Amino acid sequence: MKKCPKCKKVKRIDDFYNDKTQKTGKSVQCRECNVKGTRQYYKDNRGHILRKRKKGYAAIKVQKAKYRKENKEKCKQSARNTNYYRKFGIRIKDYDEMYERQSGVCAICGKKENAIYRGVAKN
């Protein structure tokens, strides 16, 4: 049992968030008071919070664009790897190994891969 300094109620220890910085390992305020305080802070500072958030998103967007521009090949390879994993459940290295083992020929229909469309080999 622990007493919340905000609402002055004695509550179970489970009613407090975990907090490694505190001696007890639990936050000072109970969950209920913490949520109320957070909501009130947001209401009082909504404009400032949204401006700060928007500014942060814009900066991240610029950083991402710069990274993609500087690392085109790496991003292309990463996207290709992701697509193969989502579609077929294999990585590029697995695909390349299969391609070499089968000598560039489809194991099912026996046709040779000869065209590449958007980074994917087509028959």
Image (cartoon, rainbow, N blue to C red):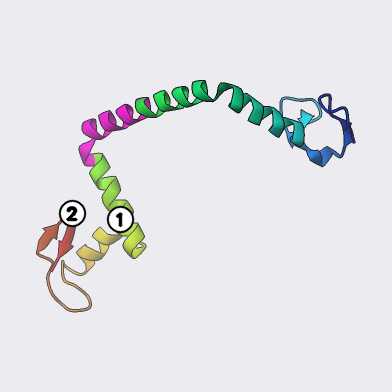
What amino acid is at disc 2?
Gly
Label 1: element kind: helix
Are dots 2 and 1 in contact, CB under 8 Å?
yes
Q: Residues within 10 Å of mark 2 (few under 14, many from 20)?
A: few
Identify the residue at image location x=26%, y=28%: 66
Query: Is 72 inside the magenta-drawn segment?
Result: yes
Q: Is residue 67 left or right of residue 120?
A: right
Judge whether residue 9 is colored magenta: no
Residues 34 and 112: in front is 34
> Disc 1 marks which amino acid?
Asn
Residue 25 locus on image (x, y percent): 77, 31
Residue neighbourhood size for the residue with mark 1, other residues' Cα within 10 Å, grouped as few (<14), some (14–19), many (≥20) = some
Residue for badge 2 = 119
Give the residue at x 54% y 25%.
46
Which tag, 2 or 1, sits closer to the chain's start? 1
Residue at image point 48% right, 26% down? 50
Write down the residue under mark 1: 83
**In the figure, 67 relative to 85: above or below?**
above
Please provide the residue range marked out in magenta.
Answer: 59-73
Give the farthest residue toward the left: 114
Figure quadrant of residue 62: top left
Nearer to us in this view, 78 or 13: 13
Q: Which residue: 10% across, 62% down?
A: 115
Q: Is residue 94 visible?
A: yes
For the N terminus, the image quarter is top right
Report, in whole angstroms, how far the alpha carbon at label 2 lies from the one at label 1: 10 Å
Q: Quadrant of the C terminus?
A: bottom left
Q: Main secondary structure of the magenta part?
A: helix
- Position of residue 94 measured from the top left corner of the image (x, y, whole percent): 31, 60
